[in-house]
Amino acid sequence: MKYGVADTTFSRVDMGAIAIKVIKSEDPDAEIIRYTVPGIKDLPVAARRLIDSGCDGVITLGWVGKTMLDKYSYLAASIGLIMVQVLTSKHVIDVTVHEDEADNEEKLKEIAIDRASKHARNLVLLVKEGKNALTPYAGKGLRQGYKDAGSID
Ligand SMILES: Cc1nc2c(=O)[nH]c(=O)nc-2n(C[C@H](O)[C@H](O)[C@H](O)CO)c1C
């Protein structure tokens, strides 16, 4: 399978490299194309171009600053990424770390690594096995970036 990895220079953690490592370990035959852009608002076109060049699915790795302008930029980027999914009928897994999720750099890095790794695994499952690949985990309260919340019995 062919996977696209789109990341940004704005990000403070190299989540693209983390995603690539996980994709390779989950799917040793994977072909991976990386596309690095300046910021999150540039991710939708990168994702679209990766799909147009034959990728079966894409993971995007973005970082959102603390200001309202950053948050509005994420909203715009997120809508763009959803549009790419709907228009191409391919998964674009939107991995985003928000700078105000933690008040120290160590914790932010931990969140970024965990989120990028877990979603890279999700992408491989969806791309390789399709719509029921994640069904065994449905309702389990899985979280990316944090400990799982768990299901409510
Ligand atoms: C305000 C702003 N905030 C962010 C951000 O939080 N994260 C990010 O990755 N990029 C940001 N950018 C840059 C835009 O996404 C984009 O790279 C530029 O507008 C150039 O197209 C902008 C302009």
Image (cartoon, helix red, strand yellow):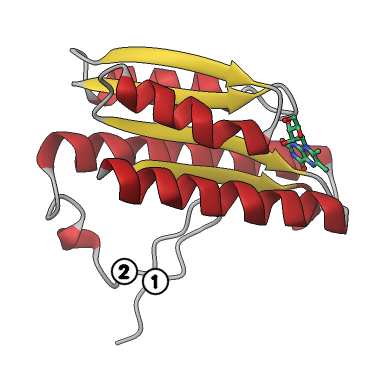
Residue toward you, 150 or 90: 90
Give left or right: position of 35 versus 108: left
Q: Secondary structure at mark 1?
A: loop
Residue at 78% x, 47% y is 99
Q: Amino acid at mark 2?
A: Lys
Residue at 65% x, 38% y is 41
**Mark closest to the chain's N terminus, 2 or 1:** 2
Residue 150 in the image: above or below residue 77: below
Residue at 81% x, 45% y is 65
Around disc 1, counting alpha carbons within 10 Å, would you say few (fewer than 14), some (14 to 19), or many (20 or more)? few
Residue toward you, 131 or 86: 86
* Residue picked out by circle 1: 150
Return the residue found at the far front.
87
Residue at 73% x, 49% y is 73
Give left or right: position of 8 versus 136: right
* Residue picked out by circle 2: 140
Around disc 2, counting alpha carbons within 10 Å, would you say few (fewer than 14), some (14 to 19), or many (20 or more)? few
Residue 18 in the image: above or below residue 97: above
Quadrant hosting residue 120: top left
Give left or right: position of 75 versus 138: right
Q: Position of residue 68 (x, y in %)?
A: 85, 58
Q: Position of residue 72 (x, y in %)?
A: 75, 56
Find out whether the residues at labels 2 and 1 contact each other: C-beta distance under 8 Å: yes
Note whether ligand 1 is within 8 Å of mark 2: no
Q: Amino acid at mark 1?
A: Gly
**Marks 2/1: CA distance?**
5 Å
Q: Position of residue 17 (x, y in %)?
A: 52, 18
Q: Quadrant of ligand 1?
A: top right
